[in-house]
Amino acid sequence: MSDQFKTIGLIGRYTRSTDLIDATLTALHGFLLKRGKNVIMDRGSAEQLSLGNSTLCERNELGQRCDLVIVVGGDGSLLTAARAVVECDIPILGINRGHLGFLTDIHPDDFEKEVDAVLAGEYMEEQRFLLTTSIHDNGKSEIMGDALNDVVLTPGGDPHMIEFETYINDQFVCRQRADGLIVATPTGSTAYALSGGGPILDPNLDALVLVPMFPHTLSSRPIVVNGNHEIKIVISENNQVTPQISADGQNRRLVNKGCEIHIRKKDKRLRLIHPKNHNFFSVLRDKLGWETKLTP
Amino acid sequence: MSDQFKTIGLIGRYTRSTDLIDATLTALHGFLLKRGKNVIMDRGSAEQLSLGNSTLCERNELGQRCDLVIVVGGDGSLLTAARAVVECDIPILGINRGHLGFLTDIHPDDFEKEVDAVLAGEYMEEQRFLLTTSIHDNGKSEIMGDALNDVVLTPGGDPHMIEFETYINDQFVCRQRADGLIVATPTGSTAYALSGGGPILDPNLDALVLVPMFPHTLSSRPIVVNGNHEIKIVISENNQVTPQISADGQNRRLVNKGCEIHIRKKDKRLRLIHPKNHNFFSVLRDKLGWETKLTP
Amino acid sequence: MSDQFKTIGLIGRYTRSTDLIDATLTALHGFLLKRGKNVIMDRGSAEQLSLGNSTLCERNELGQRCDLVIVVGGDGSLLTAARAVVECDIPILGINRGHLGFLTDIHPDDFEKEVDAVLAGEYMEEQRFLLTTSIHDNGKSEIMGDALNDVVLTPGGDPHMIEFETYINDQFVCRQRADGLIVATPTGSTAYALSGGGPILDPNLDALVLVPMFPHTLSSRPIVVNGNHEIKIVISENNQVTPQISADGQNRRLVNKGCEIHIRKKDKRLRLIHPKNHNFFSVLRDKLGWETKLTP
Amino acid sequence: MSDQFKTIGLIGRYTRSTDLIDATLTALHGFLLKRGKNVIMDRGSAEQLSLGNSTLCERNELGQRCDLVIVVGGDGSLLTAARAVVECDIPILGINRGHLGFLTDIHPDDFEKEVDAVLAGEYMEEQRFLLTTSIHDNGKSEIMGDALNDVVLTPGGDPHMIEFETYINDQFVCRQRADGLIVATPTGSTAYALSGGGPILDPNLDALVLVPMFPHTLSSRPIVVNGNHEIKIVISENNQVTPQISADGQNRRLVNKGCEIHIRKKDKRLRLIHPKNHNFFSVLRDKLGWETKLTP
């Protein structure tokens, strides 16, 4: 067994845990102790578990204390965990206990075998980039939380078409009225952006996709640009509602008329771990019901 | 005036020229002679013109004899010219006399001023990549013509759903029944692929997009992959028609059951010249009727 | 001049009137008085005007006191007016001072000629149906305001996928997770539903269209059903947010878990008046930028 | 057992029958004889079977000689059979041995029980309308075969954008360049038109849908019109290829420049028989993979 992962952090679903998540967390906790690992539980995830005298810490300290973090839950749980550990450059592994599993691709029934392989150094590591967003409002600037999936502009509480201008690397793209705009990473291209009519981006493509939501101009289309380009959204003076912006569906913030939102690639990447036999297109086929064999 | 463009080749629309194209070609021919340039006409484009004793040559020799080629026509004319000169690494400039003008972006009424600027060295040069396609059928291989826009698989003469498998860098993506598949470059993403529901790719993005045509599986979506990835299409044994493949709408070829089609980036790039003030998004707004100013 | 329209009501934009609307309202007011008509202004619309001692009344009394109501504004203004007068079975005419004009199709510059024609009995009358919505929550029922365009289910303040079941004439259609659902009339099919990917319904088609918004299941599609069918939406117990429902973007109301929303055609129709030469497809071509002549 | 179906016709797949179809046809043939029915086989379908001295006739005579026709195959087989019997006003029943089964909804494993129920008078009968198409070319008129699904205009052998004008009840809709146009019945709305982005029409809606194929104008959208409206397509003079028209994918015919294609509802309806428990939305859910139960 390789020695690179001595201390392992465990995270479950942050809110609304389920019996299945709890059972897998408990089993995994015991399994790792038996393998001689130091195990540190995210305090929030441990609340409903009876793990005896296990070591606990705050989620955002896990990165500093662990060599590996394992998340039990759905892709949403992994998103939250990823934002918490990305600064510390430690890898993350997901065990699927939710709806879709593009990020959490270990089946809970197989976790012993799969986690053993990872501990033995047999795994694939992918680098996924995140988005960092800053909001410039009347001379003041503010940094929003990171996004592994997407940054989304919406009308906020009172559904209403909103108006905004988009710029790519300071080049004006268009001014539009729409329900909003999704700016997604390749990771996010199979999440919300896909429901909105966006294309699937290969996970290792260095690109962003801008997907207009219910655009008033019917010839609007998703635009895919270089991952190093900066996206700027300017909130129009004509809006009758105050739009809001969110990162991975979290950190909602109102953006006033005249606000500028700057979105660009974060310097630090997420280190995402998969089993050796992981295959993006296989997950895609499975999740989207694509056919593999056709009969006459 | 810069001296880099001493000999200039002229090309019009290959088939079905129009009076407007002919008038612009004639005017441009005279204008360049007055500027002291050697001018060589594409023989096919010169047929309907009365240019006196002008120098003519075959289109595919223009690249070897010229420092610059100017095309008068639509994007389709430029596609054809581009495939003829790309091997020689000489730049190409388009004067628009057709429908859409993503590639041919000089207005015919302004050509004197714009061409003078280019001759003086004031221009933008873009590198656009092309696709090279090989067909492997029962042990024999064959190279198709290059494509600046797209390689398209269709049912051929007898419209009928066809069946094929797609691979990206030898990873199986899916097996599907559809009217066909478009594999487009960023240049081609604003052409046929856009009508088919594909996203717009920024022209300098190093990526390809695969757009399924009328797919039987409703969850099929366009996929954007790294421009260096090789796309492989395998024609299924179940087909009741013999599909055909084409490059930029040309060079149609039947592909039998069991055929493999390999599509990858060509080594040589096209050197495409634009006026200094060229702006992709401005062309896009203009062509797609996107709004720039909205009124309350 | 025909005598059928003796008393005429005038309505402008309810909120945020503009100078242009006010100018047209004032001119129209004078014009109708000169034609010997009794003119009654909607009190809300008259506030910013100086019309001397004009007759005013509340908007929802206009229907009882007038033979015709003229709306100056955009389609949104006409929607609001329509809901106010539909019970009284009096016709409504729109003069366009807004964005889109599917309903308000008289150009303000031509209003004298066009209104004169209408007063002389030269016009087309269309019947447009509305939707009536009732909400059944834990034994209590409540009727919402009418909708000429659409009834829309959304996540409300906190954007989040919602879950619901749809029934058509009590036949179960599906259970889905989505951003929401639009149930639109033919009138509404060219409004919000069109941005959402819905088809255009001919205005006199007796049908409804259900358009899922950003559905999680990618094979979801708009469904067009008989206009006499009742649509039932049941809010799932799994929702983590409380969705809301609105009629023509107004009358928002929260709908709790377990709520049933029943949507069906209202008995009373709106009598919508157009100039004799009105043509739906001509408006469509104009608004959507469809081509009428193509050149080679 | 009800006596209304004394003589029953049997049809398989017209071309490329399969062992499974043949087996079901043979079993069904024996089963009906045992039930005391007169059974007449379609001569084309009987060729590969060894049914002893069974009664044969041409497919298009089956309608005159039978009280009921049973088709074994996929929806394509039923389409072909439907066009053959619709004139005679006899009902048709489908046993599914193909891909999709919107029309052929009896499972081959259950056919004895299901067919017995139908023979006993326990079934649902639906009326599905067909389209009749006439082509007017330079003074000559010609009637095409009927279509239960759709009439489709395509570029024919040489894929190329085509140009045409569309009229609805003699009102000009638009002139467009596209890969073609699908005019579909509600029955056809779940077939080819669905792959092309058309909406699902409830089977008993009296409406047609026009779906543009890969339209050059990006704001083109499917249009749903009253089923009694006549659709007229005029082939533009600008075409460089000769488009072709087909009905249910059959009866292809070239349509020259200037040709007018008139499409309208056929007077005679198809009588389509389903088991008592048939439910359109249930088939839809099954075929499109729509969810019925969602888990948190």
Image (cartoon, coloured by chain):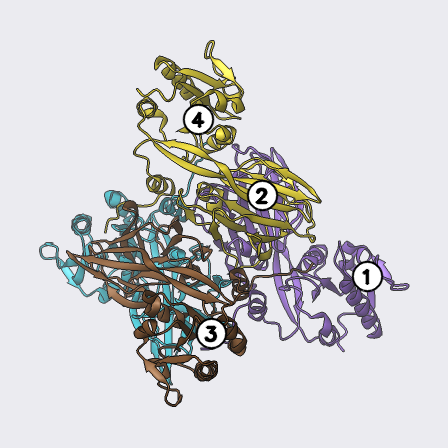
Chain colours: A purple, B cyan, C yellow, D brown
Depth check, mark 1 against mark 3: the one in front is 3
Q: Earlier in the sequence, mark 2 or mark 1?
A: 1
Asked whether the residues under marks 2 and 1 belong to the same chain, the reply is yes
Q: CB under 8 Å between callouts 2 and 4?
A: no
User: Which image quadrant for residue D266?
Assistant: bottom left
Depth check, mark 4 against mark 3: the one in front is 3
Local packing at callout 1 (Cα closer than 10 Å; few below 14, some 14-19, many 20+) is many
Label 1: state its secondary structure: strand
Q: Chain under label 4?
A: C
Local packing at callout 4 (Cα closer than 10 Å; few below 14, some 14-19, many 20+) is many
Q: Amino acid at mark 4?
A: Val
Q: Amino acid at mark 1?
A: Met
The residue at the point 76 percent across, 78 percent down is A1
Local packing at callout 3 (Cα closer than 10 Å; few below 14, some 14-19, many 20+) is many
Q: Amino acid at mark 3?
A: Ile
Residue under numbered circle 4? C71
Q: CB under 8 Å between callouts 4 and 3?
A: no
Q: Would you say residue D179 is visible in this rendering?
A: no
Depth check, mark 2 against mark 3: the one in front is 3
Residue under numbered circle 1? A41
Q: Residue furthest top?
A: C53
Q: Chain under label 1?
A: A
Residue under numbered circle 3? D95
Q: Chain under label 2?
A: A
Whether residue B65 sits left or right of residue C47 in the image: it is left
Depth check, mark 1 against mark 4: the one in front is 4
Depth check, mark 2 against mark 1: the one in front is 2
Q: Amino acid at mark 2?
A: Thr
The residue at the point 60 percent across, 33 percent down is A138
Label 4: state its secondary structure: strand
Residue B193: mark = none
